[in-house]
Image (cartoon, rainbow, N blue to C red):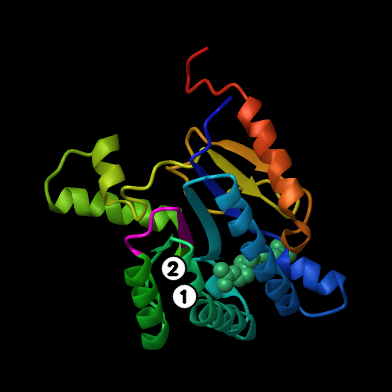
């Protein structure tokens, strides 16, 4: 049985779910947040140490302003309401991404990270304004600037995911089979599961099924 230390998730399908239910795309994001909370609980139950959630990509700025504002409001309210609870559950929150938001949100993200920084039960990495190509470009530029050798170990040290182990398992919901510029370097040897359900329809049972399959998969890492 494979050990499972780190799950990464591309939570795709909120917009389509919202429209399918004769509501707005934003209604899908709201419903998606409920699933985020359920999956966090299930991740704790399964004693998994890292959960990385793709919440907003460097390309998502192309979306209508109304949707972007809605997403960031949702995040802000979520943190304001839930950070105490996350902290009391011994959960550490880490933002991976380029923190170029409003002063208010930057402050909220910083204080949330600081407050939970010593927690040890589960680390949630929230990918916000995250893009893998930009992350790699910055890491390599920095290595050149400090005149360090460009090798795997040094690149790992300059990525936004420094000190976070590579995901063992990537799940993408929403019936789409692509990586969308998410953790391209870090997913080199991860097992990937594409789930047909839209994110707001995903549940603990689906999650458990995928994990069960993952545990039985033979991981070769280039060997036989
Ligand atoms: C992708 O679905 C989802 C996002 C870009 C946002 C993810 C946000 C949430 C799950 C809720 C908020 C989470 C937090 C942590 C506050 P999509 O909109 O691209 O769906 P589509 O493919 O149907 O258009």
Q: Which quadrant of the rendered structure holds the N terminus?
A: top right
x and y percentages locating residue 63 in the rendered image: 61, 75
State which region is magenta. 117-126
Find the residue positioned furthest to the front: 88
Could you tell whether 82 is left or right of 135 in the image? right
x and y percentages locating residue 221 in the rendered image: 48, 23
How far is disc 1 from disc 2 in space, using C-alphas? Answer: 5 Å
Residue of label 2: 87
Q: Circles 1 and 2: CB distance less than 8 Å?
A: yes
Q: Which disc number belongs to residue 62? A: none
Element type at marker 2?
A: helix
Q: In the figure, 104 relative to 37: above or below? A: below
Q: How many marks?
A: 2
Could you tell whether 205 is left or right of 100 in the image? right
Residue of label 1: 84
x and y percentages locating residue 125 in the rendered image: 45, 58
Ligand 1 neighbours mark 2 (CB distance < 8 Å): no
Q: In the figure, 96 relative to 82: above or below? A: above
Which of the pair 119/170 is nearer the observer?
119
x and y percentages locating residue 151 in the rendered image: 25, 35
Task: Give yes or no for residue 125 being in the magenta stretch.
Answer: yes
Q: In the figure, 177 relative to 37: above or below? A: above
In which quadrant of this rendering is ligand 1 seen?
Answer: bottom right
Assess disc 1: are there few (<14), some (14-19) or many (≥20) residues with their C-alpha within 10 Å of its C-alpha: some
**Is residue 105 visible in the rendered structure shown here?**
yes
**What residue appears at the point 78 percent right and 49 percent down from the top-left corner?**
196
Assess disc 2: are there few (<14), some (14-19) or many (≥20) residues with their C-alpha within 10 Å of its C-alpha: some
**Is residue 182 visible in the rendered structure shown here?**
no
Task: Give yes or no for residue 79 being in the magenta stretch.
Answer: no
Element type at marker 1?
A: helix
**What residue appears at the point 73 percent right and 71 percent down from the top-left corner?**
31
């Amino acid at each position: 049985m494979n050990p499972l230390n780190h799950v990464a998730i591309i939570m795709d399908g909120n917009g389509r779910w919202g429209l399918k239910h004769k509501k707005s795309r934003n209604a899908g994001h709201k419903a998606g947040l409920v699933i985020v909370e359920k999956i966090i609980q299930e991740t704790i139950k399964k004693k998994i140490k890292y959960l990385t959630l793709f919440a907003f990509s460097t390309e998502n700025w192309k979306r209508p302003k109304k949707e972007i504002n809605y997403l960031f409001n949702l995040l802000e309210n979520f943190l304001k309401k839930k950070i105490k609870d996350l902290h009391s559950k011994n959960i550490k929150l880490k933002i991976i991404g380029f923190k170029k938001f409003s002063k208010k949100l930057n402050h909220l993200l910083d204080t949330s990270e600081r407050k939970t920084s010593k927690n040890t039960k589960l680390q949630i990495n929230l990918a916000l304004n995250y893009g893998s190509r930009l992350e790699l470009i910055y890491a390599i530029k920095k290595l050149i600037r400090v005149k360090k050798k460009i090798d795997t170990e040094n690149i790992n040290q300059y990525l936004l995911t420094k000190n976070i182990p590579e995901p063992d398992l990537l799940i993408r919901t929403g019936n789409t089979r692509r990586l969308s510029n998410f953790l391209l370097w870090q997913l080199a040897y991860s097992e990937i599961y594409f789930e047909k359900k839209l994110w707001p329809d995903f549940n603990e049972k689906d999650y458990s099924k995928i994990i069960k399959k993952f545990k039985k998969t033979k991981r070769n890492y280039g060997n036989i």
